[in-house]
Amino acid sequence: MTDIEWDFPSPHTVDITVVEDDIDGLNHANNTVYVKWCEMAGWGHSCHLGLDIEAYRQLDRAMAIQKAEYEYMQAALLGDELRIATWLTESDGKLSMTRRFQIVRLSDGATMLRGQWKVVCIEMSSGRPRRMPPEFKDGYGAALVSEVS
């Protein structure tokens, strides 16, 4: 395995292997599968920080995707072992944060995808934007990273 050049330090990671259900008619992982992998990694990171769905319900707050961007750089093939990394890289401390993603093939360290979400805090009961509660500021704020220099 090649050393991985991460875009940011200290990623939260999830390892997966591309399976038959991920493959589309072009014989590579379908683009929608990459999106699901990013969602899995992002949600796993949130849970790791103690902000799972139960915490969201108790606080009547959630972080919802406002904008998502994905740059597909290489095709993942059946059997490829991948590492999905995620980071929180920006926060205004009030309403919004930026979550970044990088998917790397473990056999050669090639970056397969880079992605970014802008997420906003919403009140779950109404769906309207609301200020982050202290639990979000503390939990997510402690995980913020900056670019590697």
Image (cartoon, rainbow, N blue to C red):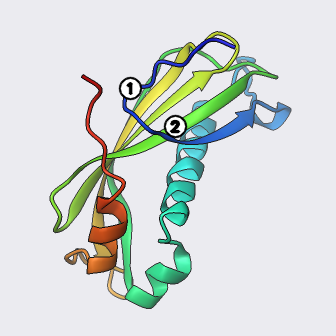
Q: Residues within 10 Å of mark 1 (few under 14, many from 20)?
A: some
| Quadrant holding the N terminus | top right
Hey, which quadrant is residue 89 in on the image?
A: top left
> What residue does disc 2 label?
85
| Number of numbered discs visible in the structure rendering | 2
Residue toward you, 115 or 13: 13
Instruction: Give me the residue at 44% from left, 25% from top.
Output: 6
Amino acid residing under circle 2:
Ala
Instruction: Give me the residue at 56% from left, 13% from top.
Output: 110
Nearer-N-terminus badge (2/1): 1
Residue toward you, 76 or 135: 135
What is the number of the mark on residue 62?
none
Residue 4 to residue 19: above or below: above
Give the CA separation, mark 2 to mark 1.
Answer: 9 Å
Percent across and percent down for residue 46 are: 48, 61
Mark 1: secondary structure: loop
Residue toward you, 66 or 46: 46
* Residue 110 falls left or right of residue 25: left
Percent across and percent down for residue 58 are: 45, 90
Q: Are marks 2 and 1 in contact (CB under 8 Å)?
A: yes
Hey, which quadrant is residue 105 in on the image?
A: top right
Instruction: Give me the residue at 57% from left, 15% from top.
Output: 3
Percent across and percent down for residue 116 are: 36, 39
| Quadrant holding the C terminus | top left
> What residue does disc 1 label?
7
Amino acid residing under circle 1:
Asp
Percent across and percent down for residue 36 are: 59, 46
